């Protein structure tokens, strides 16, 4: 695991101090080694957290003839297979690291090499003789990668801070991205909240040659076509794929453990990891002692069954919440206001004290239908046939007879939101179930809002042939998974120099799930049906039958208590008015209504707190819409 960055410099001079500042800014991603490569028209920067081949593999890694250099972030789990093939073709390796394997594979097969790789990665390769830069991101977007186009040059990096080290890069708020952020508490790609800075989409590569730049897609998940397969056949295939993936994800030359929540997904990973490991595994969990959503009885039982060396951290109002939230503004330099960032922060900090690598269960919900939103999508279709007046009467009844709850995500909160979503377009409703500000609320706090753009994001995926469930699984894999879940885990774990690996996101598992019939994903009200059937008899029934809890904090409650001070200290009247775009009176009304328990908007307030702390930390300029008339550099690229 590492961090990468770099830039081209066609017909311009760049201070040597810029590359040094970039590596210093990414130090947390790679505290073991830092390096810079200077080509005639490009510079590559790398910081390395050593996982494989601790004695070799310093980066950037350069070819034998000194013509091609690579900066690499991630892991290639089948690099030994590729290495053996390359050795058969005459390549002689200098190290045992997967970085050299990627470099030599690129020299042998050019960009076609990426299709041979299983893993999570972002890489940059410079070929001096061709004046050619290739920047590539893995299939599912597990590893982050950003770029900025300025004239004939391109800047890129694992984090925005690497690009912002260039003084000529403006720090302007992207108002279109802001509308999306306020709707869902993250920014769906390829935009970011920093105007002009874009994400390289998952499964894509960017190529630059002497001032010309274009984007290509090198992997596309299958969609639309499912196959006929029995439950037993699907179980057998899933068993083999999951076993192989976990086995490959366990390869490391440093201590390794498993994040164990006591849920189905992480417990499945632990089960296969235990079967593939001779020694005693380490497991790590976060508890919320005394709360209804505390998962400690489940993860302690799983730790007992598998005899792990178990470690846990209790997250409560007495720990240093405020200092952690302040740190987010630096490490999450593209803000994502997932309330799960706080427990992942403390989980990562605890885990890093014992191991360098952790396996997680991320991705299973988006592959096999684990979120309640998928059930909401199905149930709302007949509900929409009811007269609007009757639905409004039902919504009003909830206000009268179901008081505002301090639970994290209460039945009251879910029912109210579900009914409100029934008035929306189905694509927008899917985002809304798990989102924050409604269109009306957003226009109140941001009067110049131009719509959230979410429906257009779905249309870009061209999912007309998909059924309802597969449609929204693909939507979540493309946006929520990559831009929220994986982003959050990457930033919180790498802030503590910890590598987190998600075995469910092996592309063979992703392709397997994409071709499964919908009835093997959700059957009736049984979600992740095929995964539960596979694990039946392997995991305790209590794990298979328990409700999904979600890994975040009780924002509604804590903003009325321990986080009230940080909220009101940050969202002051002067700070809001200084933006020139937000309505301070509307935001303060929202805060007052929450504090007085008229409504529950904890997730909304978490998004605003995160946003304002980020804007302050990175000195983000807000240009009102009428003044922001320069062309969008993101429009010059075409994915082909």
Image (tube, rainbow, N blue to C red):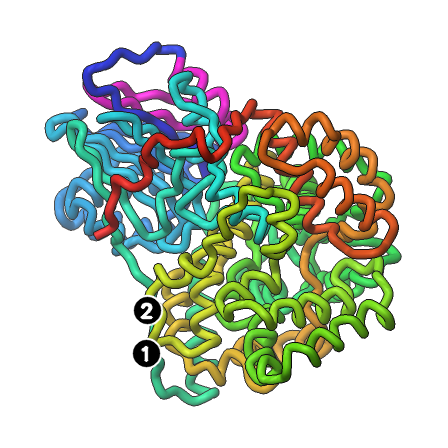
- The relative height of residue 43 versus residue 124 in the rendered view (above or below) is above
Q: Report the residue at 66% width, 58% height from top.
A: 260
Q: Is residue 501 left or right of residue 182?
A: left
Start and end of the magenta stretch?
18-47
- Counting from the top left corner in percent of width and height, residue 282 is at 65, 52
- Counting from the top left corner in percent of width and height, residue 36 is at 34, 21
Q: Report the residue at 29% width, 38% height from top.
A: 135
- What crowding class fits label 1: few (fewer than 14 Cα within 10 Å), some (14-19), or many (20 or more)? few
- Counting from the top left corner in percent of width and height, residue 87 is at 19, 46
Residue 121 in sight from this viewpoint: yes
Q: Is residue 578 left or right of residue 141?
A: right
Task: Tell me whether circle 2 and circle 1 mark residues in contact (CB < 8 Å).
Answer: yes
- The relative height of residue 64 versus residue 270 in the rendered view (above or below) is above
The circle on residue 222 is 2
Q: Which residue is mark 1?
A: 225
| Residue 41 among those drawn in magenta | yes
């Amino acid at each position: 695991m590492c961090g990468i960055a770099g830039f081209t410099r066609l017909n311009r001079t760049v201070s040597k101090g810029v590359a040094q500042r970039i590596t210093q800014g990414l130090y947390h991603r790679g505290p073991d080694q830092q390096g810079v490569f200077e080509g005639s028209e490009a510079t590559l920067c790398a910081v390395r957290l050593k996982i494989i081949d601790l004695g070799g593999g310093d980066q950037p890694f350069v070819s034998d003839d000194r013509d091609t250099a690579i900066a690499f972030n991630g892991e290639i789990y089948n690099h030994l297979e590729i290495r053996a093939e390359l050795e058969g073709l005459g390549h002689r390796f200098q190290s045992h690291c997967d970085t050299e394997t990627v470099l030599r594979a690129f020299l042998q097969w050019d960009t076609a090499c990426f299709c041979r790789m299983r893993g999570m990665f972002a890489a940059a390769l410079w070929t001096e003789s061709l004046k050619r830069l290739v920047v590539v991101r893995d299939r599912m977007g597990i590893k982050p990668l950003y770029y900025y186009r300025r004239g004939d040059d391109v800047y890129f990096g694992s984090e925005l801070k690497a690009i912002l080290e260039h003084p000529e890069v403006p720090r302007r708020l992207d108002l279109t991205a802001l509308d999306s952020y306020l709707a869902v508490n993250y920014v769906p790609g390829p935009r970011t909240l920093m105007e002009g800075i874009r994400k390289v989409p998952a499964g894509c590569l960017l190529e630059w040659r002497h001032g010309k730049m274009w984007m290509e897609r090198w992997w596309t998940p299958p969609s639309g076509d499912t196959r006929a397969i029995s439950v037993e056949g699907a179980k057998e295939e899933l068993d083999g794929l999951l076993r192989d993936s976990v086995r490959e994800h366990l390869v490391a030359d440093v201590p390794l453990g498993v994040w164990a929540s006591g849920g189905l997904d992480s417990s499945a990973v632990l089960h296969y990891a235990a079967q593939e490991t001779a020694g005693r595994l380490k497991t790590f969990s976060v508890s919320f002692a005394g709360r209804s959503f505390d998962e400690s009885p489940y993860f302690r039982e799983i730790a007992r069954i598998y005899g792990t060396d178990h470690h846990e951290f209790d997250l409560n109002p007495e720990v240093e919440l405020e200092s952690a939230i302040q740190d987010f503004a630096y490490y999450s330099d593209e803000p994502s206001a997932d309330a799960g960032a706080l427990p992942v922060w403390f989980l990562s900090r605890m885990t890093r004290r014992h191991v360098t690598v952790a396996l997680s269960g991320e991705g299973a919900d988006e592959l096999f239908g684990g979120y309640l939103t998928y059930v909401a999508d199905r149930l709302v279709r007949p509900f929409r046939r009811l007269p609007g007046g009757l639905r409004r009467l039902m919504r009003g009844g909830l206000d009268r007879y179901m008081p505002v709850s301090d639970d994290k995500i209460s039945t009251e909160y879910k029912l109210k939101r579900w009914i409100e979503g029934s008035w929306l377009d189905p694509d927008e409703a899917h985002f809304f179930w798990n989102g924050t500000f409604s269109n009306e609320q957003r226009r109140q706090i941001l009067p110049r809002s131009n719509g959230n753009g979410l429906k257009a994001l779905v249309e870009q995926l061209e999912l007309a042939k998909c059924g309802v469930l597969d449609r929204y699984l693909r939507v979540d894999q493309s946006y929520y998974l990559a831009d929220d879940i994986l982003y959050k885990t990457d930033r919180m774990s790498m802030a503590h120099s910890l590598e987190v690996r998600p075995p469910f996101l092996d592309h063979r598992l992703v392709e397997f799930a994409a071709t499964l019939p919908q009835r093997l994903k959700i059957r009736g009200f049984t979600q992740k049906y095929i995964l539960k059937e596979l694990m039946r008899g392997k995991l305790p029934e209590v794990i298979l039958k328990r409700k999904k809890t979600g890994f975040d904090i009780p924002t509604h409650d804590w903003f009325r208590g321990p986080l009230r001070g940080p909220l009101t200290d940050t969202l002051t009247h002067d700070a809001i008015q200084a933006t020139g775009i937000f309505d301070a009176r509307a935001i303060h009304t929202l805060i007052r209504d929450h504090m007085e328990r008229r409504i529950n908007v904890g997730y909304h307030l978490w998004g605003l707190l995160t946003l304002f702390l980020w804007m302050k930390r990175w000195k983000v300029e807000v240009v009102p819409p009428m003044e922001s008339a320069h062309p969008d550099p993101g429009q010059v690229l075409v994915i082909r």
